[in-house]
Amino acid sequence: MRFYDLIIKKRDGQELNQEEINFMIKEYCEERVPDYQMSAMLMAIYFKGMSNSEIKHLTIAMVNSGKIIDLSSIPGIKVDKHSTGGVGDTTTLALAPMVAAAGVPVAKMSGRGLGHTGGTIDKLESIEGFKTELSLNKFIEIVKKVGVSIISPTADLAPADKKLYALRDVTATVDSIPLIVSSIMSKKIAAGADAIVLDVTTGSGAFMSRYEDTLKLGKIMVDIGLEIGKETVAIVTNMDEPLGFAIGNSLEVREAIEVLKNKGPEDLRQLCIVLGSYMLKLGGVVNSLEEGKNKLIKVLEEGRAFNKFKEMVQAQGGNLQVIENPELLPLAKFCFKIKADKSGYVQRADSRLIGESAMLLGAGRENKESKIDFSVGIVLKKKIGDKVNINEDLAEVYYNDKEKLEDARKKLMSSFTIGDKKPQKLPLILAAISKEGIKEFL
């Protein structure tokens, strides 16, 4: 078998079989296929696409490129959650302890941020002493004892994905549905959970901005999960504006703590309860989504979710005083307020531009080598549909570097549009995709 022939086959729109896909991944991982040939294959996939059968074989080949984590020693049904990325997406920090407090174990591996989207691991590392790099034995031990642990992925978890993603990033082939599906699902399957809930974001701050494309992506991921024997559900959510009010690592930890204390932004709280209700249902601790929502509201009201978060932080070496007194979290030296230049209603608060503004301050990475500043970020004071008066605050910018502030300020100002009429706002939850099909809420 020659890789050259496989490139021609895919270039001409033909379907690759399981043996050919296994050969492609194995040879590339063992460095017998050069980057320039794999780049040609990725571009052929980008333009010609892949069938569901091809995507399934590609996903399994990527899973088998490394270690598959065995979580069977943890009692109960383990349910994982994954978001396709967004701005202010603090969901995991609040959701994981909520679900664990309600009786479903959460053994979660999360990533770091890149570009305008934040990463759960960076947020957790803004907590003094919190360790995200643990041995698998320690990880499993914490989940058994506490019910929840969040760590960064081990190096041998779907290594094919790491190699392919680095290549996709520099060959303009990132936004290909077959490549996105195989990337996400290979890591989720290799991470060993019994069931998966996906938060598939759409809108200006999301990976996929068009709703129709996002729906297609969610459907394929659910189909692949079900085919591989993992109960899988996808919730399509609106990322036209940031989730919650905080964008930036320590600022988002503060916001997650507010949610866990049964306060915090309504949209972030609502999303955690919706995603969590699906996790509880797949985890077998409730019979209906309504029962799941009520159970999660109860663990918030009784303080059990917040206590579970504290248990996890302590188990992973974090300073509990920081959680009990979030004022101790890192905060930038300076604060600049963005003011409205006219009165009216906020028509637009562009997620991508706001996320890029936070990145320019140092809250995110322009490339994988960029150093994160945990203390900087943005707190929105107004969101889409809110009334605003001239000179009223639209956002607070927390910064340490005055040069970085100027670039971030210009971009942040351009993210807001103010008009005379109150706009019609899309709902946060747009659709749910499961083995029963697609249910839209528009």
Image (spheres, rainbow, N blue to C red):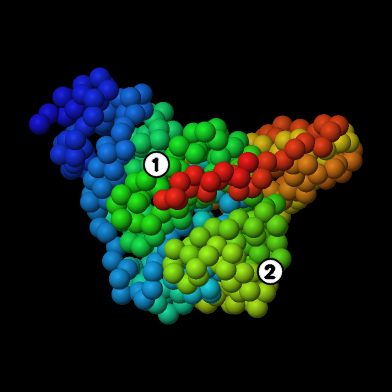
257 sits left or right of 211 in the view: right
Q: Callout 1: 10 Å neighbours few (<14), some, many (20+)?
A: many
> In which quadrant is the C terminus drawn?
top right
Frontmost of labels 2 and 1 is 1
Residue found 67% across the figure and 70% down from its top: 261
Name which residue lies at 46% across and 77% down: 146
Residue hosting label 1: 220
Image location (x, y in percent) of residue 38: 26, 31
Q: Residue furthest front?
A: 436
Q: Nearer the viewer, residue 314 or 157?
A: 157
The residue lying at 78 percent from left, 49 percent from top is 381
Residue 379 position, x and y percent, is: 72, 51
Position in image of residue 313 (x %, y %): 52, 72
Q: Is residue 157 left or right of residue 283?
A: left
Residue in the picture at 77% in, 36% down = 423
Residue 262, disc: 2
SS at circle 2: loop
Q: Residue 157 appears in which quarter of the rendering?
A: bottom left
Callout 1 amino acid: Ile
Q: Is residue 407 left or right of residue 153?
A: right
